[in-house]
Structures are given as structure tokens and as C-alpha cells.
Amino acid sequence: MNLWFRVLYVWLRARFGARLDMPFGTSRLNLMVLPNDLDTNLHMNNGRYLTLMDLGRLDCFIRSGLLSALRGTGWIPVLSAAKVRFRREMRLWRRFRLETRIVYWVDTSFVMEHRCIIAGRNGEDVVAAIALMRGGIYDRKGRRFVMVERLFDMVGLSHMQPEASAEVQAFLDAEDALKRSV
């Protein structure tokens, strides 16, 4: 319940905002650490980072037209893996910018990057947290994941697949190894 106002904010902002140039556009949301984001150390809870990163993905999907394309298909976006690196704490009332973008895709998987950016002492951008998330679009009726190219075709997006950076490839390799171990 404590995230519904932020979801409404992102939904309205995205619905009436500029279209996001996907797949290479970057969503930018200006947020603030609120009292219900805190843990017992009085800084933002590690799980709350993941929850707020959902808002970045929601903004991307709405503003790019991907969410509208899913309507009526029985397809839903799902996450399968996450890797987060916390670099700086964020305390109560701290303003930050959440940047979200697609950095890679292959077959049925997307990799999205999220960055929580705060202002440093001299006003420079400082990355407080960075995350890579792997997900895809799941077809509930067909019980399988949808090929990324098929989804891009539905909304007229480019198929130009970027090269996986070393960080993205390491993330995917680690995720695949973990998947095989279960």
C-alpha cells in the first residue's frame, strides 16, 4: 500500500509525458527517500531499492508503448534475476534520480540497468546504487516467454541489438550458472 501514490505519480507522468525513445532511451524519475523506505539503520532499506526500481521499469514500459502493446495479449512483464551494488547510503528526505534503461537483449530476455544517483558534495552526480535486472515478457496462455524481436515489431522498435558489456555478460553468466544449480 505504501507505494501506491508513487505508482500513481509514475503512471500519470508517463501517460502524459513525452514518448521514450526505446530501446535505447533512458527513463529518469526524481524521487525522495520517505519514512516508509527506511530500515532499522535509518537509511533506505535494500529491498526498497528493488521496489523503487519497479517504477523505473513501469515508466519505460508505458512511455515506450510496450505496456499498451501487451494489453489483451495475456502477456506480462516478469523479472527473473537481479544484481545490485550499493555504494552510498541514502537517508531520510534524500532526493535522488532513478535512471532506467535497457542495456541488452537476447532471444526472450531483456537486461535493464537501474542507477540511483544523488548529488555529491560539489553537486556532481554520484551513483548511490546500481543494478542489473534480467526479465522478459511471459505469455500466460502459451506458457512461454515471448521473443524480444516479436515485441519490438508490435510497437515498431529497432532490432539493433547492442553488444553485451563485460558487466552484463558476467551477470548473465552468473545467472545462468545459478539457474543450472537449482
Image (cartoon, rainbow, N blue to C red):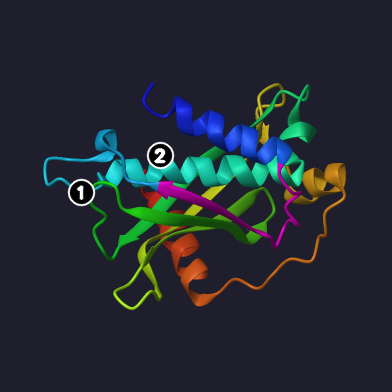
Q: Under tag 1, what secondary structure?
A: loop
Q: Is residue 63 left or right of residue 29?
A: right
Mark 2 neighbour density, 10 Å: few (under 14) some (14–19) many (20 or more): few
Q: Judge whether residue 6 is colored magenta.
A: no
- In the picture shown, does residue 40 fall above or below 142? below
Q: Farthest residue in the left direction?
A: 40
Question: Observer-nearest residue: 31 or 158?
Answer: 31
* Amino acid at the residue labelled 1: His
Name the chief secondary structure element in magenta.
loop
Q: Quadrant of residue 101?
A: bottom right
Q: Which residues are magenta?
A: 17-31
Q: Judge whether residue 19 is colored magenta.
A: yes
Q: Residue at x 27, y 33 (%)?
A: 36
Q: Report whether residue 77 is seen.
A: no
Residue 70 picture location, percent across and down: 75, 31
Question: Observer-nearest residue: 164 or 177?
Answer: 164
Quick one: quadrant of the C terminus? Answer: top left
**Residue 43 numbered mark, or none:** 1
Quick one: quadrant of the N terminus? Answer: top left
Residue 173 picture location, percent across and down: 47, 63
- In the picture shown, does residue 127 fall above or below 10? below
Q: Residue at x 71, y 36 (%)?
A: 15
Q: Quadrant of residue 123?
A: bottom left
For discs 1 and 2, the disc positioned in front in the rendered view: 1
* Amino acid at the residue labelled 2: Thr
Q: Is residue 25 left or right of residue 9?
A: right
> How far apart, in angstroms, are the residues tagged by discs 1 and 2?
15 Å
**Mark 2 sits on what residue?**
51
Q: Under tag 2, what secondary structure?
A: helix
